[in-house]
Amino acid sequence: MIIRIFTASVPSTLHQEFEAKFKEISVPLVKGQQGLLGIDIAKPTEWNPNLFVMISKWASKEDLVRFAGEQWNEAHIPKGMEKYIETCSVEHFVNIPI
């Protein structure tokens, strides 16, 4: 299993609007993909005041490539979401069964 952690820094003045669009645009885009095992999103806290996070779990790298393309290891911003994001990043990890 591949765990994909996408983080986006969003100015505080845009938090409410971004959160609504995150749920409306980004989540459905990811949820409809083959090989997606699960998805969680999180909003900023006092410790990370501008960071939103999407954690998705994928059955295989091939499923992730099918979703994100050959540049699967780069952050992808859906059309209409770019205006909210100051910076973003994506990291990938292989699950360690416990």
Image (cartoon, rainbow, N blue to C red):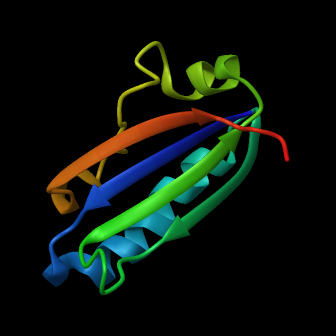
Residue ranking furthest to the front:
98
Q: Is residue 38 above or below residue 62?
A: below
Q: State the residue in front, 60 or 69.
A: 60
The residue at the point 58 percent across, 28 percent down is 67
Q: Residue at x 36, y 28 (%)?
A: 74
Residue 53 locus on image (x, y percent): 43, 61
Q: Nearer the viewer, residue 91 or 70?
A: 91
81 displayed left or right of 41: left
Q: Image quadrant of residue 59?
A: top right
The furthest residue to the right? 98
Q: How many marks?
A: 0
Q: Nearer the viewer, residue 72 or 46?
A: 46
Q: Position of residue 63 (x, y in %)?
A: 69, 24
Q: Position of residue 81 (x, y in %)?
A: 29, 55
Q: Is residue 16 left or right of residue 22?
A: left
Name the residue at 39% across, 68% down.
Answer: 21
Residue 11, compared with residue 81, is above or below; it is below
Is residue 56 placed above or below 17 in the rendered structure?
A: above
Residue displayed at 39% across by 40% down: 90
Image quarter of the N terminus: top right
Residue 64, how many percent across, how many down?
61, 27
